[in-house]
Amino acid sequence: MKLLSKIATVAALAAPFAFSSPSFSATCSPGMIADYVGYGSTGCESGDKIYSDFSFTGFNGTTALSITDSAQQHTFSASGLNFGAGSMASYSYKVTIAPGTPNTSFLAYRTSGTTSDVMTGLTATKTLTGTPGGVSTSTDGALGNVFTYAPTIAGPVDFTGSINVTGGRMDVLTDSLVQQVNGTSSVPGPLPLLGAGAAFGFSRRIRSRIKAAV
């Protein structure tokens, strides 16, 4: 009886810790709108960053989303947008430095919105606003300006993107974030364009799976 009583006491003391233990973020895997919205406030983890609180307005449900990290640059991509003339859309998400990486900080970010239509040029404005921070603006498919934190900040940063297409078609958007680690860094380069190519391929795979399921 005494042994059972001790076991019950230990279980009762351990229970609050079991139920109050923190939730851990999932890995940011390629998916669609519902998948990323489903990450909620807990978010998903890519490298040493946690992405959370995704929200999308004006996007179709089969939009293909992905987050990649390469060295000190992280890229959020969306493909299969099919935003034609007259399209307006917006989205938002939060980026937080994961626990255990005290030497990492936010350095810079930029955005882009591109088309795969080689016959018709894109006429559109794509902006990415960071809070705290500033604005990166991509016009007519060109890479947006780089917004740089000086000095760098620990975050988190709330990002809000907006899209306004007046001509042509926007198929892909990319947001690139560069961090500083132990005082070393590099500005956001042409990775958004490389990410766009990868996003196109992923978008085709997603559509093929949907057709097969139907």
Image: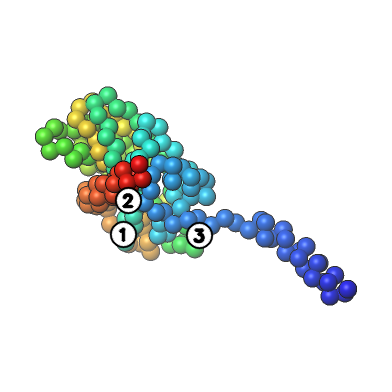
Q: Secondary structure at mark 1?
A: strand
* Kind of residue at disc 2: Thr
Residue appearing at x 38%, y 48% in the figure: 31
Q: Is residue 36 above or below residue 179?
A: above
Q: Secondary structure at mark 2?
A: strand
Q: Callout 1: few (<14), some (14-19), or many (20+) C-alpha neighbours within 10 Å?
A: few
Q: Is residue 167 visible?
A: yes
Measuring from the top left, give residue 20's x and y in whole percent: 66, 56
| Colouring | rainbow
Q: Which mark is residue 70?
A: 1
Query: Which of marks 3 and 2 precedes in the sequence?
Result: 2
Q: Callout 2: few (<14), some (14-19), or many (20+) C-alpha neighbours within 10 Å?
A: many
* Kind of residue at disc 1: Ser
Q: Is residue 163 above or below residue 189?
A: above
Residue that label 2 marks: 75
Q: Callout 3: few (<14), some (14-19), or many (20+) C-alpha neighbours within 10 Å?
A: few
Residue appearing at x 84%, y 75% in the figure: 3
Residue appearing at x 79%, y 70% in the figure: 7
- Estimate the spatial distance between the alpha carbons at disc 3 and disc 1, rounded to whole Å: 19 Å
Residue furthest bottom in the image = 3
Q: Are marks 2 and 3 in contact (CB under 8 Å)?
A: no
* Kind of residue at disc 3: Pro
Q: Quadrant of residue 28?
A: bottom left
Q: Are marks 1 and 2 in contact (CB under 8 Å)?
A: yes
Q: Which mark is residue 99?
A: 3
Q: Is residue 125 left or right of residue 152?
A: left
| Observer-nearest of 34 and 101 | 34
